[in-house]
Image (tube, rainbow, N blue to C red):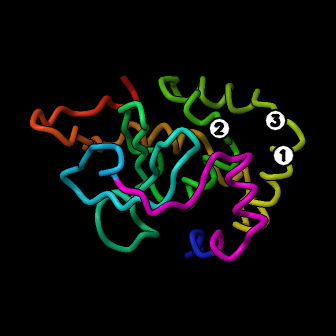
Amino acid sequence: MFDYLNTIKSNKELVQALRCHIDFELTDCGLDDLCAYSRISFSVFGCDGSGGLFGFIGEGNTNSLAIGYVSSEGQVGRIAANLTDFFHLIVFHPMRWQNLIGKDTKEMERYSNEMKFDDEVKEAQQIAVEAFNLKKENYSVSKFHSALMELPKFVVYTNDDRDEEWEDLLK
């Protein structure tokens, strides 16, 4: 399986492209930074520019674990079945993957096909495509839709006395 995280760590051009135009950065933050917790393991590996966190759901081989997202605004959900699907999602739908939420698969595909990016984003995408050896035809937004719908839902709670669930991304 491809080692995405070490590839990022060893490629400064990729780090810059991901940070500036894909809205992803490796981090060592955790749910505690958002005053939240999960009853199952959630190992954070990345963040976006708004303070949202990306992490592995569960324990085991990271290549086979689902990826969850916890926004700084209190929304949470499973967004990818694995790291490969995750990087396809954020590279081919940079800073806009959240706009796909709430649409059915057909609407997601249509929206995805209509996305236009400026030259800087296209250049960042190309850097990531080459570094990760990604092919757009190997990914469909239906994988994203399936991850969002998978049960049981990934749940995060407030880190206070109330133990309230954060809002599901699909609500």
Q: Is the C-beta separation of discs 2 and 3 under 8 Å?
A: no
Against 130, residue 6 (above or below) is below
Residue where numbered disc 3 is placed: 117
Q: Quadrant of residue 64?
A: bottom left
Q: In the rendered view, does 105 fall on the left or right side of 29?
A: right
Amino acid type shown at disc 2: Met
Q: Is the C-beta separation of discs 1 and 2 under 8 Å?
A: no
Q: Which residues are magenta?
A: 7-30
Q: In the rendered view, does 27 fall on the left or right side of 149?
A: right
Real-space Cα separation, disc 2 to disc 3, in angstroms? 10 Å
Amino acid type shown at disc 1: Lys
x, y percentage for residue 91?
68, 50
Residue where numbered disc 2 is placed: 95
Against 1, residue 116 (above or below) is above
Whichever of labels 2 and 3 marks the residue nearer the N terminus, that label is 2
Q: Quadrant of the N terminus?
A: bottom right
Nearer-the-camera pick, 84 or 98: 98
Question: Element at badge 1?
Answer: helix
x, y percentage for residue 7?
65, 73
Real-space Cα separation, disc 1 to disc 3, in angstroms? 6 Å
Q: Is the C-beta separation of discs 1 and 3 under 8 Å?
A: yes
Q: Residue at x 36, y 38 (%)?
A: 76
x, y percentage for residue 45?
47, 61
Real-space Cα separation, disc 1 to disc 2, in angstroms? 13 Å
x, y percentage for residue 73?
41, 31
Mark sitting on residue 122: 1
Amino acid type shown at disc 3: Phe
